[in-house]
Image: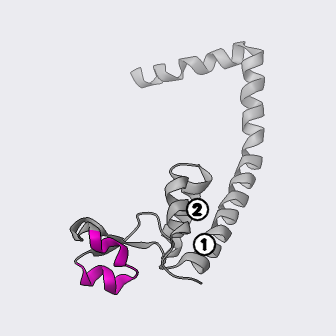
Amino acid sequence: MRLLRILRPLRMIQRNQGLKLAIKSLVKVVPAVINLLFISVINLGLLAVLGLNMFKGTFYSCDMANIPVLQQTNVKNIWDCQDYGGQWTNANQNFDNFFSAYYTVFQISTTDNWLGIARFALQKTEIF
């Protein structure tokens, strides 16, 4: 019975006509918002497939923590990296499969760390 006290503020909606109108308009907008969400999901999916085709497997880089400074300029590919004692690692945000590509595109669209992703895209290790 005490849980029903939570519903008390809903009685205020019946008394306040302005609030009642706002709630009704919010309910009417829900289908349009769902439509917009559906279109956004499809657009992000298309961009993820495009990024997958362009950048698949190219966001790898050499972790040069164990390589002497004088030899770091000689590292050009995976074999040089491993020969000099480095570790060939992939970026956290990459385009290696659809789900990571979708997450990366979503992260770019929200402008959260998009400069780091752009840096990896500019320094990609293969030419398509």
- Mark 1 lies on residue: 51
In the rendered structure, does residue 78 fall within the stretch colored magenta?
Answer: yes
Amino acid, disc 1: Gly
When asked about the image quadrant of residue 14, the answer is top right
Mark 2 or mark 1: name the one nearer the start of the chain. Answer: 1
Label 1, residues with CA under 10 Å away: few <14, some 14-19, many ≥20: many
Q: Bounds of the magenta span?
A: 70-84
Quarter in which the N terminus is drawn = top left
- State the predominant SS element of the stretch in magenta: helix
Q: Residue furthest top?
A: 15
Q: What element carries label 2?
A: helix
Q: Is residue 61 above or below residue 107?
A: below
Does 81 sit left or right of 30 as displayed?
left
Which residue lies at the image location 49% right of the left edge and 65% below the top edge?
120
Which residue lies at the image location 70% right of the left edge and 64% below the top edge?
43
Q: Which residue lies furthest to the front in this view?
A: 70
Q: Which mark is residue 105?
A: 2
Which residue lies at the image location 62% right of the left edge and 17% below the top edge?
11
- Tag 2–tag 1 contact (CB < 8 Å): yes
Q: What element carries label 1?
A: helix
Kindly tell me whether residue 7 is visible in this rendering: yes
